[in-house]
Each structure stands twice: as structure tokens, then as C-alpha cells.
Image: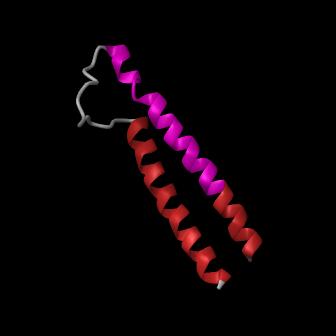
Amino acid sequence: MNNLLDIALIITSLGLIISVILQSKGAGLGGLTGADTGGVFTARRGIERVLFWVTIVLSVVFFALVITIILIGR
């Protein structure tokens, strides 16, 4: 059981790292079309929206796995 949780935590953390890196690289892509990217609040469309929600879901799963591993470890 612990090995399964550890493997799930590793996979989740790698997915979370990748999604955060992709978000930081995708931040400047709006400038290619001439859109104003200087504002703090921009509408997320398409893949940016999906990537945003994937990052949120992965972070919630990550923290749930960490808390579960801590509680089982006692």
C-alpha cells in the first residue's frame, strides 16, 4: 500500500512540475499575436484554461496524497 502511494505521489509531482513549467513558458505566447500581455488579469482560453485547471487538480491530489501518507505512516 505504501509503495503504491509513493509511486502515485512521484507521478503526481512530476505532472505538477510539468504543468507549472508549461504555464510559465506559455505566458509569453500571447505576445506573438499582438495581444496585450502586460496586464495581471487576462482571460484564459483554450489550452491555457485546461492547463490551469490541470495544475489545480494535480496540486489538490498531491496534497491529499501527502496527508494520506503522513496519516498512514503513524
Q: How many marks?
A: 0
- The location of residue 41, given as percent across then percent down, is 23, 37
Percent position of residue 32, x then y: 37, 15
Residue 63 in the figure: left or right of residue 45:
right
Residue 65 coordinates in the image, percent (x, y): 58, 69
Quadrant in the rendering for residue 45: top left
Residue 38 vs 2, above or below: the answer is: above
In magenta, the rendered stretch is: 11-33
Q: Residue furthest bottom?
A: 74
Specify the farthest residue to the right.
Answer: 3
Quadrant that contains the N terminus: bottom right
- Residue 10 percent coordinates (x, y): 67, 57
Residue 16's place in the image compared with 28, above or below, is below
Q: Is residue 19 on the magenta stretch?
A: yes
Q: Specify whether 50 is left or right of 17.
A: left
Q: Image check: 11 left or right of 19?
A: right
Indicate the quadrant containing the C terminus: top left, top right, bottom left or bottom right: bottom right
Main secondary structure type of the part rendered in magenta:
helix
